């Protein structure tokens, strides 16, 4: 899984790590109404509402690259 620097080091007070993100993405989640298209990178950004390993609410923002069938975690909180 690819994560931006912002995803790795912002919101460190929550002590979120890659396991929390993977757990949240594996669970049943909802895409919030927050999504936008980034023309510069030609990617869709989605905010996903889910929960971390401890069951606390977690929002993950991912950027989907449809051409290459990949995504990266932009941020998490």
Image (spheres, grey):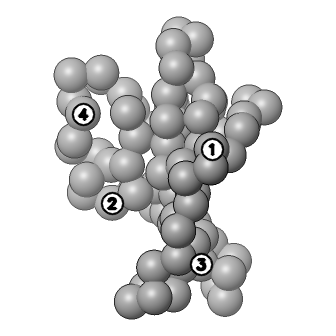
Measure the alpha-carbon separation of dots 3 and 2. 14 Å
Earlier along the polypeptide chain: callout 1 or callout 2? 2
Q: Residue at x 72, y 35 (%)?
A: 29
Q: Secondary structure at mark 4?
A: loop
Circle 2 crowding by C-alpha within 10 Å: few under 14, some 14–19, many from 20: few
Res 46 quadrant in image? bottom right
Single out the mark in the foreground, 3 or 1. 1
Single out the mark in the foreground, 4 or 1. 1
Single out the mark in the foreground, 1 or 2. 1
Measure the alpha-carbon separation of dots 4 and 2. 13 Å
Residue named by callout 1: 32
**Mark 3 touches mark 1? (CB < 8 Å):** no
Q: Secondary structure at mark 1?
A: strand
x and y percent of residue 51 in the render?
Answer: 58, 23
In the rendered structure, the answer to whether residue 50 lies left or right of residue 27 reads: left
Residue named by callout 2: 4
x and y percent of residue 22 in the render?
Answer: 59, 38
Earlier along the polypeptide chain: callout 3 or callout 1? 1
Earlier along the polypeptide chain: callout 4 or callout 3? 4
Extreme residue toward the right, this view: 28
x and y percent of residue 71 in the render?
Answer: 57, 66
Residue named by callout 3: 65
Circle 1 crowding by C-alpha within 10 Å: few under 14, some 14–19, many from 20: few
């Amino acid at each position: 899984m690819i994560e931006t620097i912002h995803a790795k080091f912002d919101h460190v007070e929550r002590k979120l790590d890659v396991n929390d993100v993977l757990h949240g993405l594996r669970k049943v989640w909802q895409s919030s109404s927050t999504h936008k298209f980034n023309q510069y990178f030609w990617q869709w950004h989605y905010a996903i509402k889910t929960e971390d390993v401890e069951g606390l609410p977690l929002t993950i923002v991912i950027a989907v690259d449809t051409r290459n069938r990949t995504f990266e975690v932009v941020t998490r909180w």
